Amino acid sequence: MSDSRVALITGGTRGIGKAIADRLLSDGWRVAVCGRTPPAEDDGAVFIQADIRDAQVAEDLVAQVKERFGRLDLLVNNAGGSPNVGLADSSAKLVERVVALNLLGPIYLARAAHAVMVGQTEGGSVINIASVSGKRASPGTVAYGAAKAGLLSATSGMAMEWGPKVRVNAIIVGLVEAEEGQDDHYGGPPGVARISNMLPMKRMAWGADIANAVVWLASDQAAYVSGAELAVHGGGEVPAYLGLAHG
């Protein structure tokens, strides 16, 4: 019955979020995406402008989706990120904004989505896009790593509180290929090649890899999966000490 199901994807106009939106649309879902700026082109998803760091805006966003479609079956908390700045050089305002985007916003949205999903016969599903930064040290993005760690804790907590009607899971994302024109993020093509070579799968993740995981977690095949942390990182990053030891 995917042709009647409704998904809301935050940060769904580019990168991983767009890959998820495109996949769900191709599978027949009705999709709403949000962001602070509209997408460059109409891809079939309904765009709603929103800054999820504001609790009232987050609640209003879910209310708009419910009003338009009559239901909400899947929330994908994908919006996130952080500039690369050492904590000692970060302002309190920057720390607050990073935590709000990566932890508080997803919690606000999950609360609002739960209020809709719990009243539906089929319930619903919340998928939080987490990061390996929440499982290991995150130098240069300390607040981001702390927020993602908090999101993983929130995932298991919400899963316990909201079962059986609402399932809550997290996807732990590793290194993902940058969008076209953004190779400089990894040091250009040579940097991408070096990083890819040290990963077990010999490549970074593609947006489609994350989208595939979302589709499965939202499906009936995962009906008994809740509170899970699904690692989609291609086997993980090789510990740096191994390279030093065998250098």
Image (cartoon, rainbow, N blue to C red):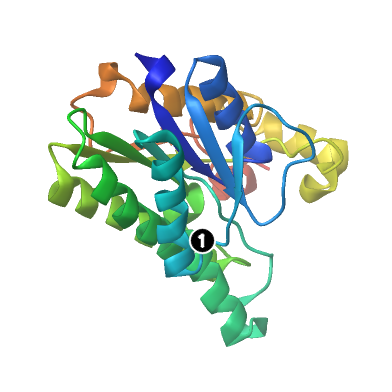
Q: Amino acid at mark 1?
A: Ile
> Is residue 161 in sight in this rendering?
yes
**Residue positioned 83% across, 41% down in the render:** 183
Could you say which is closer to the camera, residue 6 or residue 166?
6
Number of labels in the image equals 1
- Residue drawn where x is 57% and y is 62% of the image: 51
Visible residue check, residue 227: no
Q: Is residue 19 left or right of residue 227?
A: right
Query: Looking at the image, is 110 positioned above or below residue 196?
Result: below
Quadrant where the N terminus is found in the figure: top left
Vertical position of residue 139 compared to residue 4: above or below: below
Q: Which residue is depicted at the point 39% across and 20% down?
A: 4
Instruction: Identify residue for label 1.
Output: 52
**Where residue 143 sits: x, y (%)?**
52, 70
Residue 150 spot, x, y in % from top left = 36, 61
Is 241 displayed left or right of 117 in the figure? Answer: right
Which residue is pictured at 29% across the width and 50% down the height? 155
Kind of element beneath mark 1: loop
Query: Could you say where residue 86 lies in the image, as x and y percent from the top left?
Result: 65, 75
Q: Is 116 placed above or below 26 here?
A: below
Q: Quadrant of residue 89?
A: bottom right
